[in-house]
Amino acid sequence: LVMMSRLYKIDDDITDEIIDEYKPSLKKAENLLGYDWSLDYLAVAIELGIVSEQAVKDMFAKKTIFTDAKREEVAVLLINAMGLNEDAKSLKVYKLPFNDVDDITASARPYIYLMYEKEIMLGDNEKNINPKNKITRAEISTLLDKAYDYIDDNNIAPEFDKYEPTTTVKGMITDVSTGKAESYIYVKSDKEVETIIKIDDDTEITVNGRVRELSDLKKDMLVTCKINEERLAVEIEADSTKDVVRGIITSVAYVSPAKITIYDEDDDKIIFDIGKDVDVYHDGKSTELKELNKNDEVTLLLDDKVVYQINSVSRIKHYDGAITSIDYNYPIKVTMKTDEGVSKTFVFTGDVDVTRNDDDDSSFDQVRVGDEVTITTEYDDMISINTIAKEAEMSGIIKEILIAPQVKIKVADEDGDVTQYSVSNNVIITVGNKNVSIYDLRLGYNVKVNTAGDEIVTMEVSQIETAKSFTGKIVFINVDDKLIMMQNNTATGKTELIYLLVTNNTKIFDTS
């Protein structure tokens, strides 16, 4: 039974759910002493339909589970494991080719027939199946290999409809956001990866082993969360018994008795004892005490005033990757995916140094989704952002411009082939380091464009007037380039990103 339960690769979290379903009941079985190790496997065997829960309990009660299985018993169990139980039950007309067919228990005959038909159990040289013989380890190994090949060749996969695939996220709560429609917790792992986890009324929450509510979850609690494919928490186990202290490292004594000295968030200098089995992480990677650096930011986890885990972060860090989104609601947030595939979000402030294509004469309004980017942080706060323009998908010459509710433009490539594109409402158009509008384009201009679907989202032009009304909120002002970046409220109630050039003829009115 244990070996048959391993025939399929089952998602770890689904396996855990299966074990949770059956193990509590199986632990009450008689004569279990010394065989607790088997219960996880037996739970899976029950869910796969190899054997029933009551049958397992009966086998423990009668101690038959400890005896060698007969060949015909293995045939029944293995057909069940292969998902052919219903085929065996519905089998009415068949002929067994064995000389000792009369020795086979009547209820086992259709199962043995299917084993023979699938070329898994063929009998001996005397055309006997030997149904009552005890099966040997070598024989069961051969049968399992054949069964596995049959399962693989026929793409047989068990269905676990009542179980929801989940992923386990472990870490520390960094923030709790509650709302009428949706609530979230932010969890940062030991590898410095932050995950946003959605919570609803069905989420099971326990704190220190007791059933609790969302309002009981607090920053700095250690949590283990089971989340589904929509990143909705099915279950959250929180631990509030551990102390958390943050600060800046001043020194580390890594020779026994090990100690760490920090300035905490109140700027108080504190010394902590370090446990012998301390786990140390630096920038999300496992390391040693001696690798910790002065002035690095640190989070200490303490149990009974002794440090058992240290998470340190370099004062200065660099992240390379690509910008995936920009949220222009205050405060402006830039989200990137690093080269390692990790999503990171940073807040942009007026103090951040901005360069584009290594040009110091740059501004944030030139930062675009899709750009390659290097973001530099100090204690996790963005201090500089350098972007490299995404390589153009297509270049050519403007042949036609249609100004309408949906602006369209025709571009001829180097082969003379003309393609028509729609122009996104929040298209970014640049001439050198200057942002311009669609009304500044002229026939014959050379352009390089990037698209999303059939819409142009960015356009670089080789040459610059305007007349239109916009209403909305200013999100950024580039004083040097005299450019205003704003969110315009459209007639449909949606918002779009607009770039407005300010000239000497621009009239500015204070309507407050």
Image (cartoon, rainbow, N blue to C red):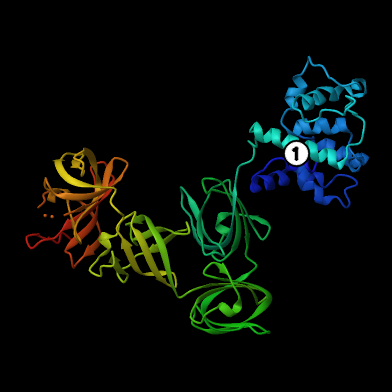
Whether residue 69 sits left or right of residue 363 in the image: it is right
Reply above or below: 169 against 82: below
Q: Quadrant of residue 242?
A: bottom right
Give neighbour class at mark 1: few <14, some 14-19, many 20+ (Cα, 10 Å): few
Among the 4 quarters of the image, the one containing residue 382:
bottom left
Instruction: Note whether 162 is above or below 465 in the view shown.
Output: above
Q: Does residue 499 appear anywhere in the picture?
A: yes
User: Is residue 319 found left or right of 394 in the rendered image?
Assistant: right
Question: Residue farthest to the front?
Answer: 125
Residue positioned 84% across, 23% down in the render = 109
The image position of residue 188, as x and y in percent, is: 53, 62
Q: Nearer the viewer, residue 448 or 47?
A: 448
Quadrant that contains the C terminus: bottom left
| Residue 91 pos. (x, y %) | 76, 18
Q: Residue at x 51, y 61 (%)?
A: 193
Q: Residue shown at 11%/51% (left/top)?
A: 466
Q: Position of residue 486 (x, y in %)?
A: 24, 56
Residue 49 seen in the figure? no
Q: Residue at x 72, y 47 (%)?
A: 20
Percent x, y of residue 465:
9, 52
Tell me the residue that label 1 is attached to: 145
Residue situated furthest top in the rendering? 93
From this view, report whether residue 320 is shown above or below residue 112. below
**Residue 112 in the image: above or below residue 299:** above
Give SS at disc 1. helix
**Amino acid type, mark 1:** Asp
Mark count: 1
Question: In the image, 444: left or right of 318?
Answer: left
The quarter of the rendered structure image containing the N terminus is top right
Given residues 131 and 62, the one toward you in this image is 131
